[in-house]
Image (cartoon, rainbow, N blue to C red):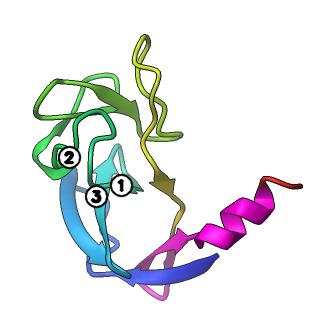
Amino acid sequence: MKWLKVPVGPETDQPYLKKVKVDGKAVCIICHDGKLYATSAWCPHAGADLSYGFISKDGNLVCPVHRFCYNLENGRGCEGQGDYLENYPVKIKDNEVYIGITGFWERVMQGFK
């Protein structure tokens, strides 16, 4: 896994939802309840831009188009959806935000463990 710097500050006092480009990927950075999350920026259901979505009362990321929702912790779709959102680990180091991206072959090899 490689850790890539994200162009957002580490502040977690205000909630936000932003789309950024990291290593050619569109990623949503979400600050919710004082914690940072990173997910794919595209809804797996119909490809909508999740940065135009919102966080529900129960802490799920909600797609702006069809209102599909995803758990911020694990990316699982809400009950009955049968899909998931790609999540990335987040860490703060030296007052900078980083996300962990696993390469394709790393993911393939993890499948054999």
Q: Disc 3 designates what residue?
A: 28
Task: Name the element at disc 1.
Answer: strand
Q: CA distance from mark 2 to mark 1?
A: 8 Å
Q: What is the quadrant of residue 67 in the picture?
A: top left
Check disc 1 and give the amino acid type: Ser
> Dot 1, crowdedness within 10 Å: few (<14), some or many (≥20)?
many
Check disc 3 and give the amino acid type: Cys
Q: Is residue 48 left or right of residue 10?
A: left
> Dot 3, crowdedness within 10 Å: few (<14), some or many (≥20)?
many
Residue 31 in percent (x, y) is at: 30, 53
Q: Disc 1 designates what residue?
A: 40
First-in-chain label (3 vs 2) = 3
Residue in the picture at 78% in, 59% down:
110
First-in-chain label (2 vs 1) = 1
Q: What is the quadrant of residue 66 in the picture?
A: top left
Q: Are marks 3 and 2 in contact (CB under 8 Å)?
A: yes
Q: Are marks 2 and 1 in contact (CB under 8 Å)?
A: yes
For the record, the magenta segment spans: 92-110
Above or below for 74 versus 7: above
Q: What is the quadrant of residue 12 in the picture?
A: bottom left
Residue 87 in percent (x, y) is at: 47, 52
Q: Nearer the viewer, residue 44 or 39?
A: 44
> Dot 2, crowdedness within 10 Å: few (<14), some or many (≥20)?
many
Q: Disc 2 designates what residue?
A: 50
Q: CA distance from mark 1 to mark 3?
A: 6 Å
Q: Are marks 1 and 3 in contact (CB under 8 Å)?
A: yes
